[in-house]
Amino acid sequence: MNEELLKMSKYLRLTGLINNWDYYQEIALKDNLSHTRFIEFIIEEEYKMKKENSRILRMKKAKIPENLTIETFPFERQSKINKNKVLNLYDNFDYINQNRNIIWIGPTGVGKTGLATSFLMQAINRGYKGYIRTS
């Protein structure tokens, strides 16, 4: 990459392009990409990188205590939790679309933080911001 292109790429914050320029050129030559397809490829790669960096930043800002997911939640050890109801709420994502909060109430050890974390991680992965507040 020449100096002028590097300068413009930095100004536009195209870090993916800057860091992967040689690799992108190799792909273009190997796959015999047209100019249009090459530009599409670069833009797609930059877009994916920026989306992932944004997701990582939202995760950091959320200050999630542990990386807990709904798939790893031990429903079998929590007999008082209605698994179908929780999974339906999780899968439908209606609480976000309807601007509603979820408040998890229960004794210590029931899995409130685990459920809250998994719901928050789902929202963050879909592009939303959030955080966990414990009392």
Image: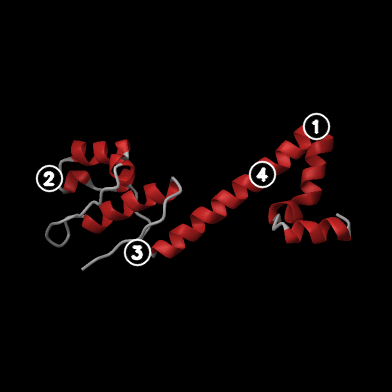
Position of 32 relative to 120 (above/below) = above
**Label located before the other in sequence (4 or 2):** 4
Disc 2 packing (10 Å; few <14; some 14–19; many ≥20)? few
Q: Find numbered disc 1 in the image and state the secondary structure of the residue it sits on.
A: loop
Residue at image coords 39%, 62%: 62
Please name the residue that numbered disc 4 is placed on. Answer: 45
Decide: marks 2, 1 in contact (CB < 8 A)? no
Question: Mark 2 or mark 3: which is in front?
Answer: 3
Disc 3 packing (10 Å; few <14; some 14–19; many ≥20)? few
Report which quarter residue 103 is drawn in. bottom left
Question: Mark 1 or mark 3: which is in front?
Answer: 1
Please name the residue that numbered disc 2 is placed on. Answer: 79
Q: Find numbered disc 2 in the image and state the secondary structure of the residue it sits on.
A: loop
Please name the residue that numbered disc 1 is placed on. Answer: 33
The picture places residue 32, in percent across and down from the top left corner, at 83, 31
Q: Using the image, tell me which numbered label, if any, was put on residue 65.
A: 3
Decide: marks 4, 2 in contact (CB < 8 A)? no
Label 4 vs label 2: CA separation?
Answer: 45 Å
Decide: marks 1, 4 in contact (CB < 8 A)? no
**Label located before the other in sequence (2 or 3):** 3
Label 2 vs label 3: CA separation?
Answer: 24 Å
Residue at image coords 84%, 36%: 29
Label 2 vs label 1: CA separation?
Answer: 56 Å
Specify the amino acid type for callout 1.
Leu
Report which quarter residue 66 is drawn in. bottom left
Disc 1 packing (10 Å; few <14; some 14–19; many ≥20)? some
Label 1 vs label 4: CA separation?
Answer: 15 Å
Residue at image coords 10%, 46%: 80
The picture places residue 76, in percent across and down from the top left corner, at 19, 44
**Label located before the other in sequence (2 or 1):** 1
**Label located before the other in sequence (1 or 3):** 1
Q: Residue furthest front?
A: 99
